[in-house]
Amino acid sequence: MPEPIQVFNGLDEDDVNRMAQAIIDTFEQVSASVIDEEDGGDEQPASVPPIPQVPPLDELIGIDPEVYRQINAALAAGFRHLLFYGPPGTGKTTLAQRVAGVISERWKLITGSADFTSQDILGGYIPLQGGVLKFFPGVLDETSAQGRDHR
């Protein structure tokens, strides 16, 4: 039977100390269970993929190093959807393409429009003659370039 979840009162100093100790104990328990290659172990955790890093681009002049630190911090935190904004000609698209290439070999550049609807992006069903609904994919749906019929 699993242990019950501990509850702590953040206004009680003794409880705060117990919480801190519980966190330390848990961290030490988890750390001890990970095999470290430097200690002679040859196993690596299979579920931990390498964290992608975006190096500064020499061709983008004037991008503050803080931008790269923020991008890499976001990637390290597991974020894969980033929004770049700024005046035209500042390298947003080039930087976005580089980030996409670091994250995945498969990516798609889409130029957004204020006129886009969810159907334009995701796809949707359109009624045709004879009561047929046909699915027309949006720009993000790569499963079909033709459309699928449904009755």
Image (cartoon, rainbow, N blue to C red):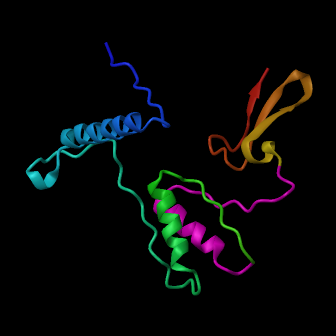
User: Which residue occupies 56% across, 57% down?
Assistant: 107
* Left or right, residue 22 beside residue 123: left
Picture quadrant of residue 21: top left
Figure check: 144 above or below 52: above
Residue 92 among those drawn in magenta: yes
Figure check: 151 above or below 100: above
* Left or right, residue 41 beside residue 46: left
Picture quadrant of residue 82: bottom right
Q: Residue furthest top?
A: 1
Residue 106 among those drawn in magenta: yes
User: Which residue occupies 37% across, 35% down?
Assistant: 14
Residue 88's x, y, as percent? 74, 78
Picture quadrant of residue 45: top left
Q: Residue furthest front?
A: 13
Instruction: Out of 102 and 25, give the one closest to the viewer.
Output: 25
| First to last magenta residue range | 88-116
Instruction: Out of 142 and 25, give the one closest to the viewer.
Output: 25
Residue 3's x, y, as percent? 33, 19
Instruction: Out of 42 and 100, give the one closest to the viewer.
Output: 42
Figure check: 76 above or below 46: below
Instruction: Out of 112 and 47, give the one closest to the viewer.
Output: 47
Residue 1's x, y, as percent? 31, 12
User: Which residue occupies 51% across, 72% down?
Assistant: 68
* Left or right, residue 139 beside residue 113: left
Residue 125's x, y, as percent? 80, 33
Which quadrant, please, contains the C terminus? top right
Figure check: 107 above or below 64: above
